[in-house]
């Protein structure tokens, strides 16, 4: 069962401890690192509730390409998820620019291609993560 960890105008974090899964929904445009100052502390709360080998579902369909400083916060968050033992990550991405930004984060943080897949629907992403 999903437990909400954070929900604000920029993102929403939930954790399903039984599935060992973190859920992230990115919302709108992130104008600065200051605007998402709680992102890393909120992510750390999620990480504290899961075990290595966990899965992650990131819904980017409501988001926009963030400001450069906010993008750096996303990169730091990805590093933390990898250090915590990310098993697989499903990304819901429907816009070309968001796909390109996602690919850049994946490449720059060294997320192995077999650990991440992009989907058009949450249902397809959940099936892949549950398999």
Image (cartoon, rainbow, N blue to C red):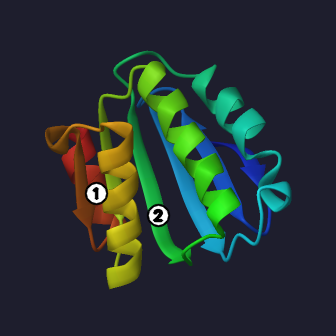
Quarter of the image with the C terminus in it: top left
Percent coordinates x, y for residue 8 in the rendering: 80, 62
Is residue 16 visible to the viewer in this orientation of the structure?
A: yes
Image quarter of residue 125: bottom left
- Residue at the (66%, 70%) spot, across then down: 67
- Residue at the (73%, 46%) spot, across then down: 39
Q: CA distance from mark 2 to mark 1?
A: 10 Å
- Residue at the (25%, 47%) spot, across then down: 116
Q: Earlier in the sequence, mark 2 or mark 1?
A: 2
Category of crowding for the residue at label 1, using alpha-carbon neighbours closer than 10 angstroms: few (below 14), some (14–19), many (at least 20)? many
Category of crowding for the residue at label 2, using alpha-carbon neighbours closer than 10 angstroms: few (below 14), some (14–19), many (at least 20)? many
From the viewer's perspective, is the residue at label 2 or at label 1 nearer? 2
Percent coordinates x, y for residue 66 in the rendering: 61, 70
Whether the residues at callouts 2 and 1 have beta carbons within 8 Å, the answer is no
The residue lying toward the viewer, choosing from 41 and 67, is 67
Percent coordinates x, y for residue 14 in the rendering: 61, 45
Mark count: 2
Image quarter of residue 95: bottom left
- Residue at the (42%, 28%) spot, across then down: 82
Judged left or right of residue 70, residue 92 is: left
Q: Which residue is mark 2?
A: 59
Q: Which residue is mark 1?
A: 125
């Amino acid at each position: 069962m999903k437990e909400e960890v954070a929900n604000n105008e920029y993102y929403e974090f939930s954790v399903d401890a039984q599935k060992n899964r973190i859920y992230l929904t990115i919302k709108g445009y992130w104008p600065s690192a200051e605007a998402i100052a709680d992102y890393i502390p909120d992510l750390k709360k999620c990480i504290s509730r899961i075990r290595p080998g966990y899965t992650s579902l990131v819904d980017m369909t409501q988001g926009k390409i963030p400001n450069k400083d906010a993008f750096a916060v996303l990169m730091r968050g990805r590093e933390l998820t990898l250090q915590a033992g990310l098993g697989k990550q499903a990304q819901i991405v429907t816009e070309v620019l968001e796909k390109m930004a996602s690919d850049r984060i994946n490449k720059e943080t060294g997320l192995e291609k077999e650990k991440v897949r992009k989907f058009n629907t949450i249902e397809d992403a959940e099936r892949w993560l549950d398999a």
